[in-house]
Image: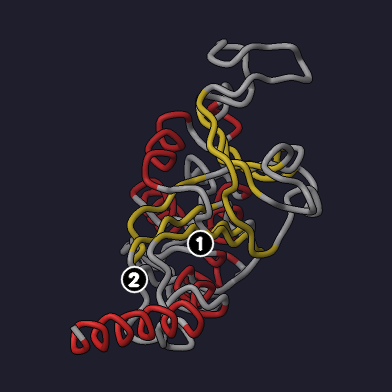
Amino acid sequence: MQRKWLVFVSLAFLLLFSLCFGVPSSKAATVNKFIIINKATNRLAYYENGTLKKEFKVATGRSPSYTPEGKFKIVNKIVNRPYYTGHIPGGDPRNPLGNRWLGLNARGTWGTTYAIHGNNNPSSIGGYVSSGCVRMYDNEVEWLFNQVPVNTPVVITTSNSSFDAIAVANGLKSGKGTPSVPVTTIGETLKKGSRGPAVVTLQKKLTSLGYSTKGIDGIFGANTDSAVRNFQRAHHLQVDGVVGPNTRKALGL
């Protein structure tokens, strides 16, 4: 009996110790799931177990100050939220909030004012058009809604850094390993597969010169590659789709 009593006391002590002091962890422990939104490129990154799983194009505030920046949490999840201001019920095709609402605790609010949500105007995605919320395509926000629980961390920033660098800076993942999605900076060689602010600058420049990239999304894909090659051909440069020193100089970048 005495031996059983000692075992019971020992287990109780260990339980109390773990509750009071917690389990030791590294300074930059990996959060299981989190979201980063970069207003510089209007891209949203979804991370799981420290790895970038998916990246989406989003729309943010029509003025830089409209969409709040900082580290927040998802505090509520609503399917087909009504648009109270316009007296439009949830699920109505006219509803500008789309089919899913991920409310954020930004600027002292509690998921009622700022959110990641769908939209009934797909052409607005990618632009600076909202009153502060982060818009996504309905099918993509529905997928994200199904992945993330309440209390998922969300970082919103305007940055030239990669998503991995932003995650490390905010203590959401370890700095070990290589970036899962490298972002090319201005001045470096750009080619198919490059992404980030430098690609946005390139796409804007090409478009302004009449070489359409069919969108400005910060991703050097097939359309941007085609626009670069057309520019190179017209300016008697090597037609390889690579924006190196000669092509960059001709573009004025």
Is 88 drawn above or below residue 103 in the view shown?
above
Residue that label 1 marks: 199
Q: Residue at x 40, y 83 (%)?
A: 23
Q: Nearer the viewer, residue 103 or 192?
A: 103
Q: Are marks 1 and 2 in contact (CB under 8 Å)?
A: no
Q: Which residue is mark 2?
A: 180
Indicate which disc residue 23 carries.
none
Which mark is in front, 1 or 2? 2
The answer to whether 161 is drawn above or below residue 127 in the figure is below
Q: Is residue 118 above or below residue 235?
A: above
Quadrant position of residue 111:
top right
Q: Position of residue 157 (x, y in %)?
A: 65, 63
Q: Please tell me which residue lies in front, 28 or 131.
A: 28
Q: Position of residue 57 (x, y in %)?
A: 49, 45
Q: Position of residue 173 (x, y in %)?
A: 43, 76
Q: Is residue 103 left or right of residue 68?
A: left
Query: Where residue 188 appears, x then y in whole percent?
Result: 47, 78
Local secondary structure at mark 1: helix
Judged left or right of residue 36, residue 89 is: right
Task: Say which residue appears at 26% left-offset and 88% top-offset.
Answer: 6
Q: Quadrant of the N terminus?
A: bottom left
Q: Residue at x 64, y 19 (%)?
A: 82
